[in-house]
Amino acid sequence: MLGKAIQPEIGALIAERRFEALREQLEDLEVADVAEILEDLPSSDAAVVFRVLPRRIASDVFERLPFEDQERVIREMSQETLGAILNAMDPDDRTQLLEELPAEVTRRLLKTLKPEELRVARTLLGYPEESIGRLMTPEYFAARPEWTVEETAERIREVGGEVETVLYLYIVDEKGRLIDDVHIARLVMARPGTKLAELVDDSFVSLSAFDDREVAVAAFKKYDRFILPVVDRAGVLLGIVTVDDVLDVEEEEATEDVHLFGGQAALEHPYFSARPIEMLRKRAGWLTFLFASGSLTAFTISQFEDLLQRIVTLAFFIPLVISTGGNSGSQSASMIIRGLAIREIDMADWRRVFRRELSIGLTLGALLGLLLGGFILASIGLGAIEQGPAFAVVAMVSVTAIVTLGALLGGLMPFFFKRIGFDPATSSAPCISTIMDVSGTLLYLGLAAALMSVI
């Protein structure tokens, strides 16, 4: 990468205090390359770079940096430099930064903002966490239906550079309510004297500022758009959300789901940037809960002490039978969680999932039961197991039942957690496995006690 290649040269210019040469060289680079250079520079040197860069370039570079690099550079910047960068940043990117920083740092940064930018920042921070309102930028181009194409084009030339994008024009009434959005291509193709009202077709799609940001992800996928307007409950246009913001959300949601499915709370920082205390806090809670829950397995086994003393062979297959049930549940849970996340599956589909997982669980269970039964019969024939053929039947029935139970639990638990307001990914692989350890042990030994007395 270019940034990595010229990083030593940039470091030398800083050390020699050749700031004019440094500025010229940085201005010739792409913003992404400058951000790449800064990621590995010491914080003090990175702060120097921001002091010599023009304000707009500095804000673009700052937006490209990972959060942990933004945080460390902030601590080295002067109030003046920091204020210039923050005031030039896009409101949505600035809001995301302010949300993630410690409260005392956020208060310091808010003091550096100009009155108008401070008003915007406080407005965006006033929306619920993880709402679309936190993602939007209020920098858009609004037009009135009575304007002509020629008038609109002239206004775009005047203020177009100050807004996020002019790909779409947002037609609003006298109260600011959104009437329609018009693609810039339609404006270009229309005659100069045409009024915007004639270009309106009332087929626009908008987002509510108070909806969860996952709604925005789904809307962008469904309508295949790069930009969507955001309105309040009265339909007043508040801002726009762009696809780059939505991609960041999708990455965060995917990361959170992966962490939850691994049996831990989601990390707020990248792995190597997370403090050890954060790692311990995020992992210890789930691990302690699963450990305590797992102790129920030992209690369950103790209730069948007499049975295990009479038929010691039953104990040999406990790990195999129980882990198979947990694996079956984890498979089902992973598919359902993914289906719910990308909206291939709706909450109303739980009955269909139940029927499907019941069928698949029975089939897989029967297949694995036959394999285990065949193995046990072969072992009995070779004298490796001192039990009769009835034991093979017990094992076959137990595996079939446990695999089916695991599939049903894994398939239905994500629905249960979502219904009670938790992330479906909470029904993680460790969670399913822990439940199957207890329920599977009870089912296995219970069936063995019942069937061995009958067969």
Image (cartoon, helix red, strand yellow):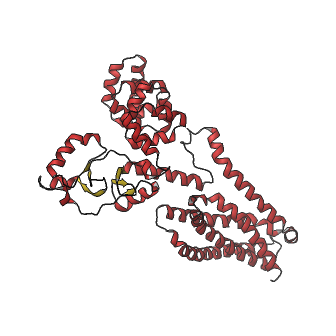
The reply to whether residue 388 is visible in this rendering is: no
In the displayed structure image, the side of residue 401 where residue 156 appears, left or right: left
In the displayed structure image, the side of residue 148 where residue 446 appears, left or right: right
Query: 188 or 450, which lies in front?
Result: 188
User: Which corner quadrant holds the N terminus?
Assistant: top left
In the displayed structure image, the side of residue 228 where residue 267 appears, left or right: right
Q: Is residue 381 above or below residue 279?
A: below
Q: Is residue 83 above or below residue 144?
A: above
The reply to whether residue 401 is visible in this rendering is: yes
In the displayed structure image, the side of residue 6 where residue 444 appears, left or right: right
User: Which corner quadrant holds the C terminus?
Assistant: bottom right
Rendered residue at 43%/18% (across/down): 15
Query: Seen from this angle, which residue lies furthest bottom?
Result: 454
Q: Residue 63: x and y, percent?
A: 40, 38
Q: Is residue 260 above or below residue 377?
A: above
Rendered residue at 20%/44% (across/down): 155
Query: 140 or 2, which lies in front?
Result: 140
Q: Quadrant of residue 119?
A: top left
Query: Seen from this angle, which residue lies furthest top?
Result: 16
Marker count (numbered): 0
Q: Residue 162: x and y, percent?
A: 28, 40
Q: Residue 335: x and y, percent?
A: 54, 64
Query: 199 or 264, which lies in front?
Result: 199
Rendered residue at 81%/79% (across/down): 452
Q: Residue 187: x and y, percent?
A: 18, 53
Rendered residue at 42%/48% (across/down): 135
